[in-house]
Image (cartoon, grey):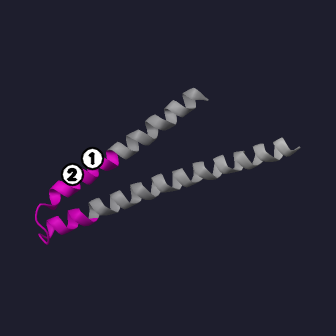
Amino acid sequence: MENEHIEQHDELKTKIRDKAGRYTYILGLLVTSFSILVFGILSALEVIDHAHIMVLYLGGYLLFQWIAGIVIFNQLMKKY
């Protein structure tokens, strides 16, 4: 009975950790998308110089994060 309680508690921790990771991933995507938008607008208004480099970097990072999420999910699905 004690082992069952421990396993349920560990399963709960795993579910919570998975949810936290998912929310963090989504938040990172939103922040990156918003940053691209802000730097793009500031660059178009010529408020800051060389913002296009930052926009390209953030766009690449957004693409990397999106692809990494898909690849990791697919690898975990194959494993289990």
On residue 1, which mark appears?
Answer: none
Query: Residue at (34%, 57%) from the top-left corner?
Result: 32
- Classify mark 2: residues with Cα within 10 Å, few (<14), some (14-19) or many (20+): some
Query: Residue at (30%, 62%) from the top-left corner?
Result: 35
The vertical placement of 42 against 21, above or below, is below
Residue 68 figure quarter = top left
Residue 73 point in image, percent of width and height: 51, 37
Query: Residue at (37%, 61%) from the top-left corner?
Result: 31
Q: Quadrant of the C terminus?
A: top right
Residue 41 drawn in magenta: yes
* Left or right: residue 28 compared with residue 20: left
Residue 12 point in image, percent of width and height: 70, 50
Query: Residue at (52%, 56%) from the top-left corner?
Result: 23
Which of the two residues, 5 or 54, is positioned nearer the viewer here?
5
Part of the protein shown in magenta = 38-63
Q: Residue furthest top?
A: 78
Q: Assign the magenta stretch its main secondary structure.
A: helix
Q: Please name the amino acid that badge 2 sits on.
A: Leu
Residue topped by disc 2: 56
* Left or right: residue 78 compared with residue 11: left
Q: Please name the amino acid that badge 1 sits on.
A: Gly
Figure label count: 2
Residue 43 point in image, percent of width and height: 16, 65
| Label 2 SS | helix
* Left or right: residue 16 compared with residue 50: right
| Label 1 SS | helix
- Classify mark 1: residues with Cα within 10 Å, few (<14), some (14-19) or many (20+): few
The vertical placement of 78 against 32, above or below, is above
Residue 62 drawn in magenta: yes
Which of the two residues, 61 or 4, is positioned nearer the viewer here?
4
CB within 8 Å, label 2 to label 1: yes
Residue topped by disc 1: 60
